[in-house]
Image (cartoon, rainbow, N blue to C red):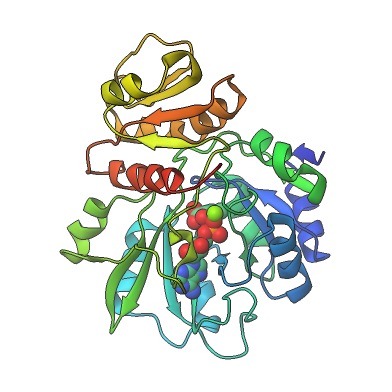
Amino acid sequence: MAEIGTDIERAASLLTQGELVAIPTETVYGLAGNALNVEAVAKIFAAKNRPQFDPLIVHIPALSFAKNYVTEIPKKAERLAQLFWPGPLTLVLEKKDDTIPALVTSGLKTVGFRCPDHPLTRKLLATLPFPVAAPSANPFGYVSPTTPEHVNEQLGNKIGYILDGGTCTIGIESTIVGFEGGEPVVLRLGGLSLERIEAVTGKLKVQTHSTSNPLAPGQLKSHYAPGKPLKLGTLEELLQEYPAHDSGILSFSRDFNSPYQRILSPSRNMEEAARNLFQFLRDFDKMPIDIILAELLPEEGLGRAINDRLKRAAAVDNS
Ligand code: TXA
Ligand code: MG
């Protein structure tokens, strides 16, 4: 198991030596390594068992730190960073050659940057002379971690240190925005709602479907999956098909009076639902049930990102 603590200097010194450290962010915990050190980046892929076609997000303390690594920063990217950084938004920008290693970006001509909003990680990033590559700190394809314990359970034997920043306050991965001819395109729904971005940019293209050679492999249809099969639908109907005593029930707000249920938000608050989602999916893995039955939330606010994760979890064949 890894050591868990709040020692920023220790985290910085391990990262400087090319070792991996799990870091807290407001979205989910990241598995961090020096983004300019190819050996450190290779360790990230190995620890997660992550295919090399899936690019990593690079974490920086402010947009000015991206300038050395990109050809240009579109006006609208600058505006979004001004308004939403630090925060749950990743900006995919055109990469300058020979800066960020190709392994980080899976050979793409672009690189995703994010300025996370967590006091410990902000302090850590500000002390480092290099940016930090950090995917979510979970084995590839599994649910993202929102507590230090989640990281320790799954990757504890593969990393040196877990920087303990408590439970993630947003609980779902960042929204990813790329640019086509200067115009923003949403590549992954996440912790910053579409409504909040569109209030600034106007109506946006959302391009989050999977392809065989995905531009944003977080968009692989089957992803973010718990260890048990998950069925989506109307809970009343699903409960006729699957026996309640063998089923976990994930509802938005309703109480089904089952010992194996989790209610995302009794008051139908999307932020609370997002914060609970990944913890609840992990809870089901520990219950004596065979299957998880879940309903979609209203397609608004963070409900969109939650629904996206539920659909991807349901697309996995766990048999
Ligand atoms: O909230 C988050 O974004 C968390 C925390 C740790 O920052 N990180 C995260 O990383 O969710 P990860 O590796 O689980 O997801 C990264 C996704 C990739 O799967 C891919 O979809 C997208 O980011 N991505 C990264 N670089 C990209 C690029 N150059 N072009 C398109 N998509 C990119
Ligand atoms: Mg991930």
Q: Position of residue 150 (x, y in %)?
A: 65, 36
- Number of numbered discs visible in the structure rendering: 0
Camera-nearest residue between 126 and 113: 113
Q: Position of residue 91 (x, y in %)?
A: 41, 68
Q: Percent position (x, y) of residue 30?
A: 61, 52
Q: Position of residue 224 (x, y in %)?
A: 50, 47
Please tell me which residue is depicted at 52% across the width and 44% down the height of the picture.
225
* Side of 257 where 8 appears, left or right: right
Quadrant in which the C terminus appears: top right
Residue occupying the far left of the picture = 202
Residue at 64% across, 65% down: 132
- Residue that appears at 42% across and 17% down: 243
Q: Is residue 299 visible?
A: yes
Q: Is residue 111 above or below residue 297?
A: below
Is 312 left, or right, of 157 in this rendering?
Answer: left
* Relative side of 221 to 122, left or right: left
Q: From the viewer's side, name the closer residue of 306 and 89.
A: 306
| Residue 114 visible in the displayed image | no
In-image side of 204 versus 214 (left or right) = left
230 or 306, which is in the foreground?
Answer: 230
Quadrant occupied by the N terminus: top right
With respect to residue 259, does 315 lie above or below?
below
Looking at the image, the residue that sits furthest to the bottom is 97
Viewer-nearest residue: 212 or 180: 212
- Identified at 32% across, 59% down, the residue is 83
